[in-house]
Amino acid sequence: VFELDYRDMVKQNRRQHLRNIFRQAGLGAMQAIALERGAKERIARATAQAMERARVMMERQEMERRLMSREEEQGRRVDELRRRMVEKPERDFQERGHRLFQQAIARMAYAHPSIRRLHWKRAWVHTSLDESLTAQVRDPASGALRLFRLQICQFDEDTSAMVNELSRWQDVHHYAVMKVHHASCYHSPLVGPSNGENLGDVRGVAVISSFCPGGQLAEQCLYDSHPKVKEDTMIKWARDVAAGLRALHAAGVTHRNLNPRNVHIDERGRAVICGFQCLKSPRAPGDPYSMGRNDCGSLGIMAPEVDDGHPVAPPSDIWAFGCCLVAWMTSEPEVSQGVMRNLPLDRILRRIPARFGPKLRAAVRMCLQHHPDHRATAEDLWKLLSTSNKSGGGRGGGK
């Protein structure tokens, strides 16, 4: 009996122990499930928070992108408005010039075919007072760029004087002189726009000349926009101008308006004389009605004898050439009236930079002589500037 009771008690203890083990295992499984559920909830919360942060960040970036895009669009609009404000005067200037060009071609009922076939490119100079015009055009026959000038004249003698002088310019064939391809005068009636009343006649001279794409020589000599011009380059340009003056004076023509800005550079880098006085004022030299006021165009380069009332002659162009040399070498394209006449020659030479040698200084000295008989001729200047540096320096220094 005792053994049976003992066995029953052992069995009960084992059963109780197994129950405890199963109960603990169930509690552990429940705890593991609870921990796993909590971990999943934490992961889900962290994922949701991360997604929320990412969404907020994306919304913020999208908002910033839209703001930046709006600011860029506003900036582009402001820049466009500014560009239009800056370009409006130039657009109006070009539109006015184009209209003047078309009106001038339409008025020339019997214009030469070389004028009628021109294609408009852009306007350089025009005035609203007398409708004078200087424009860049293209000749479709040759494909070359030309300058078209329309000079309005007040009287018939002005048109005849201008055409006669331009005909003499057409006879000068030299690379250093602007080529005049065509010059003709025209008369056209001016009709009122409202009632068709005859308001008089419009007299003008149409000129087609060559175009120099290199711009003004004076602009090449400015320190702020171009490197310093070397002595060899300046001598080459001065030699070109002297050769052009030699050809003009040999043909019996005077320029009368040679100033630092009336010399241009062609496509081969050579200096070309442009801007004749007849293109600025159609009055003939020595005209009794103008009392000589139109004989010389630029007051700063006016020779002393012309300033004193004497007629314009080739020595006047030589004086102007000396003023141009000083202006180019000192990078001062604008010459004030009376400066060259009142300053001593030695003081003028001291203003020239040291990199320019004795040849150019000798040319300036030969040009800026107050008495016209003491000045060199264009032939003398061309010979001086055409010699070698070694021989030219000694010869220029001696003079």
Image: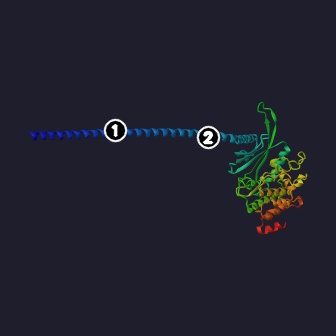
Residue 2, picture quadrant: top left
- What amino acid is found at the position of numbered circle 1 in the picture? Arg
Whichever of callouts 1 and 2 sits on the residue coming sooner in the sequence is 1
Q: Secondary structure at mark 1?
A: helix
Residue 43, given in percent of the width and then of the height, sits at: 38, 40
Label 2 near label 1: C-beta < 8 Å? no
Checking the image for residue 37, the label placed there is 1
**Res. 9 visible in picture:** yes
Residue 313, given in percent of the width and then of the height, sits at: 87, 55
Residue 390, given in percent of the width and then of the height, sits at: 77, 69
Residue situated in front as seen by the camera: 172 or 314: 314
Q: Secondary structure at mark 2?
A: helix
Q: Is residue 238 above or below residue 286?
A: below
Residue 65, picture quadrant: top right
Q: Which residue is mark 2?
A: 75
Side (left or right) of 290 relative to 97: right
- What amino acid is found at the position of numbered circle 2 in the picture? Gly
Extreme top residue here?
Answer: 195
Figure quadrant of the C terminus: bottom right
Figure quadrant of the N terminus: top left
Q: Residues within 10 Å of mark 1 (few under 14, many from 20)?
A: few
Judge depth for marks 1 and 2 and give the one in front: 1
Q: Residue at x 41, y 40 (%)?
A: 46
Checking the image for residue 181, the label placed there is none
Q: Residues within 10 Å of mark 2 (few under 14, many from 20)?
A: few
Q: Is residue 209 above or below residue 366?
A: above
Q: How is the image coloured?
A: rainbow
Residue 204, given in percent of the width and then of the height, sits at: 80, 43
